[in-house]
Image (spheres, rainbow, N blue to C red):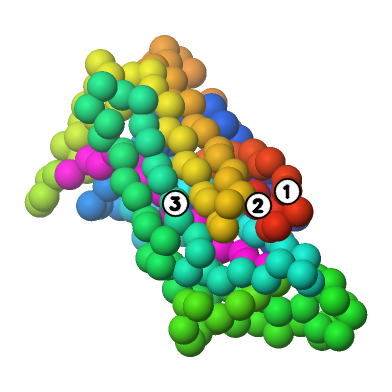
Amino acid sequence: MNGGVATGSGPSAFTPITNVTPAQAIVTQFRSWMGVVDPASAFGAAYANESGNRMTFAVSAIGDPSHEFSISQMSFAGRSSDPSGLLNFDVPFGGYNYSAGYVGVRFGADGKLGGGDDIFITSGPNTQLVDALFGRGSGNSLAAVCHGCTLGEQQAAIDAVAADPGFPFSFTGTYTVVEDSASGTFNIAGVPEPSTWTMMVLGFAGLGFIAHRRKSKPALMAA
């Protein structure tokens, strides 16, 4: 899932955030959402099949007509500041492909994004040149596992991960396209007081961050 506070439907309703609690940064092999098991009962039927929350850095890269690029020229590095580097991983150059989740855009005759004449690239060689790229992004989270457990045991598994003494720590994702880079960071805080759990769980619908440094070729945004 991409991160942010959901204030409605569609991209315009997405508000990225940077500070999350441990329970908001845990994926599970059972049904859960925002650190709560049996999410359908807690949040409604729309959440029935969720399996926790993954910190994800969406990406957009927009070039100009004189500087096309390809998704093969994009890499990603995820780094967490905890002592064991639990969330560290890399996607090397050449590791991404065009798909429904990573869409390349070739500008139309007007030479700019939008206007109804753009061509969308969702398949084919990852070396195809494009003018812009939009992707759901890469990410990672801690994991809570509890095979064949009761709901109470599942909740206990989440709580045990959330209480790990390694908190607080940060998780930073950095994309590089050609020579331009952009980074975003999640700050994972320690476990809050029990009385604040309900408000925090109900107050968020996702995770995310936007940070970017613009250059002429291409401009990148990691969210």
The residue labelled by disc 3 is 76
Residue at 38% x, 18% y: name it.
168
Q: In the rendered structure, which disc, 1 or 2, sits on the residue that comes first in sequence?
A: 1
Q: In the structure shown, which secondary structural element does the residue marked by tag 2 occupy?
A: strand
Residue 65, relative to residue 156: is it above or below?
below
Q: In the image, which disc is placed on residue 220? A: 2
Q: Amino acid at mark 1?
A: Lys
Mark 3 residue type:
Phe
Percent from the top left, x then y, of residue 211? 64, 39
Contact (CB < 8 A) between labels 3 and 1?
no
Q: Residue at x 50, y 78 (%)?
A: 127
Q: Which residue is mark 1?
A: 215
User: Is residue 9 at all visible to an observer of this figure?
Assistant: no
Q: Nearer the observer, disc 1 or disc 2? A: 1
- Which residues fall within the magenta stretch? 132-145
Q: Which is nearer the N-term, disc 3 or disc 1?
A: 3
Q: Observer-nearest residue: 131 or 46?
A: 131
The x and y percentages for residue 26 are 34, 39
Would residue 110 be counted in the magenta stretch?
no
Q: Are marks 1 and 2 in contact (CB under 8 Å)?
A: yes
Q: Quadrant of residue 48?
A: bottom left
- State whether residue 176 is above or below residue 94: above
Residue kind at label 2, given as amino acid type:
Leu
